[in-house]
């Protein structure tokens, strides 16, 4: 029992690799997205997902598109950050805002293209506002979970 912590954890564990950490981060992100998407499907009239399997696939697609959006936003921000001047600071903000805003249209169209009427966001601005609300909740919950995880150190 001396080689165990609390009776069930090994006393010495291997540190996870970067690839393992990345996998866990995306895996957790997809699960969070699926839970959020299904909660909105169940409790909102603006979100419709035909089945759990489709919500899982939509969660995968949304996670990939959100990560791609963040990567593009960081690229645009770094491009303007590398240049001097007030105009470049303004362009950095506007560029980031534009990428984040346009990405919601891309996500909505991608979901519509891939899933058709089986995954829908309905309501204000043809479903754009409910999609933005869902995406914001997903990002906030993912960040909250990450902060809780870091807090356990």
Image (spheres, grey):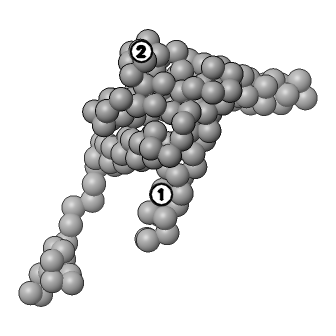
Q: How crowded is mark 1: few (under 14 residues within 10 Å), some or many (20 or more)?
A: some
The residue located at (21%, 61%) in the rendering is: 14
Q: Which of marks 2 and 1 is in front?
A: 2
| Percent x, y of residue 109 | 52, 15
Question: Residues under labels 2 and 1: Cα distance?
Answer: 31 Å
The residue located at (57%, 26%) in the rendering is: 122
| Percent x, y of residue 92 | 77, 28
| Residue 42 in view of the camera | yes
Quadrant of the drawing holding the N terminus = bottom left
Q: Residue furthest bottom?
A: 2
Q: How crowded is mark 2: few (under 14 residues within 10 Å), some or many (20 or more)?
A: few
Q: Quadrant of residue 23?
A: top left
Q: Is mark 2 on a helix, strand or loop?
A: helix
The residue located at (45%, 20%) in the rendering is: 111
Q: What element carries label 1?
A: helix
Give the labeled residue for mark 1: 145
Give the labeled residue for mark 2: 116
């Amino acid at each position: 029992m001396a080689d165990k912590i609390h009776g069930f954890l090994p006393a010495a564990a291997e540190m996870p690799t970067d690839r393992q950490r990345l996998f866990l981060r995306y895996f957790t992100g997809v699960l969070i997205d699926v839970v959020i998407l299904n909660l909105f499907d169940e409790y909102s009239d603006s979100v419709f997902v035909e089945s759990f399997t489709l919500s899982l696939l939509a969660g995968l697609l949304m996670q990939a598109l959100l990560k791609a959006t963040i990567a593009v936003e960081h690229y645009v921000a770094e491009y303007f950050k590398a240049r001097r001047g007030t105009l470049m600071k303004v362009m950095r903000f506007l560029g980031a805002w534009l990428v984040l805003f346009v990405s919601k249209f891309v996500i909505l169209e991608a979901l519509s293209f891939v899933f058709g009427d089986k995954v829908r966001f309905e309501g204000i601005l043809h479903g754009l506002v409910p999609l933005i609300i869902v995406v914001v909740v997903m990002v906030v919950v993912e960040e909250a979970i990450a902060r809780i995880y870091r807090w356990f150190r």
